[in-house]
Image (cartoon, rainbow, N blue to C red):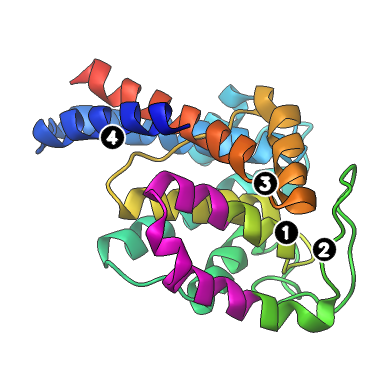
Amino acid sequence: MRGLLKKIDEKKALLDSKRPLPTYTVKSIRENLLLEWTYNSNAIEGNTLTLQETKVVLEGITVGGKTMREHLEVINHKEAILYVEEIVNGKENLNEWQIKNIHRLVLKGISDEHAGVYRNQNVMISGAQHTPPDFMVVPDEMKALIDWYEGEAQKLHPVERAAHLHAIFVGVHPFVDGNGRTARLLMNLELMKNGYPATIIRTEKRLEYYTALDKAHTTNDYDDFSKLVAEEVEKSLGIYLKLI
C-alpha cells in the first residue's frame, strides 16, 4: 500500500505542476467523469440504465421501458455531484448538515420522507455479515464519525482518509436507503478537497468492493478497501495526465 500511495503522490505532484490545466480538456474530463460516476454508482445499486441511456437521461430525455425511480436516480446523482463541487469550491469543513443535504439530493422525489433523515428503524445490509448499529445510536455514531474525521483521520494520507470515511459511514448505514451512493459522494468530496480527481468505483468491481467493505466492518481491517480505492485514484490521475 505504501508503494501505491507513493506512486499516487508522484502522479499528483506531476498533475499539480501542470496547473492551470487546459480549460476545454478539464471540461471534457469533468463531463465524462460526471457520466461515468453517475452510471457506475447507480449500477452498483441495481439501476438498469446503461451508460448510453444514463447519458441520454442526463441530457433531459426519457428512456422508454425504464422506471421513474431509475430516471430520478440519474438526475439526483448529478445534482448531488454539483452540490459536492460547491462544498469543495467553498472549502467548507465536513459536517452532518452537508451529509444530510447530499443524501436529501440522492433520494429527492424517490423517498422524500426518508431523504436527509437518519433512519428510525433497524436494517440489514443484503449479503453482508456486518449488521449496522441500532437506529437509536445512529446520531451518536454520526457525531463520532465527525469527531474521528476532525481528529484521528487527519493523520491519514488523504486517499486513505477518503476510503475510511466511506467505509465507516456505510458501516453506520445512517439512512434507510441511498447509503452507498452517499458514501461514494463523500469519498469523492474528500478526494476533491485535497486536489485529487473524482474517482469511480466501477460496477465490474462490485463483488471486490462489497467484500472489502464487509471485511473492514467485521474485522476493523481497512487495508483491502483502502487499496481498492487507491488503485482507482491512481487510474483517475492517469486519465488526467494522459490528456494533458
Q: How many marks?
A: 4
Q: Residue furthest top?
A: 242
Q: How far apart are marks 3 and 4 (CA)?
A: 23 Å
Location of residue 69 with respect to 42 vertically, above or below = below
Secondary structure category for the residue under label 4: helix
Q: Say which label, 3 or 1, has the lower sequence index.
A: 1
Verify whether residue 193 appears in magenta: no
What's the mark number on residue 171? 1
Residue at the image position 86 percent from the left and 75 percent from the top = 134
Q: Are marks 2 and 3 in contact (CB under 8 Å)?
A: no
Residue at the image position 59 percent from the left and 25 percent from the top = 51
Q: In this view, does 50 lie to the left or right of 94?
A: right
Secondary structure category for the residue under label 1: helix
Q: Say which label, 2 or 3, has the lower sequence index.
A: 2
Q: Distance between the residues labelled 2 and 1?
A: 6 Å
* Residue under label 2: 132
* Residue under label 3: 221
The quadrant the C terminus occupies is top left
Q: Are marks 2 and 4 in contact (CB under 8 Å)?
A: no
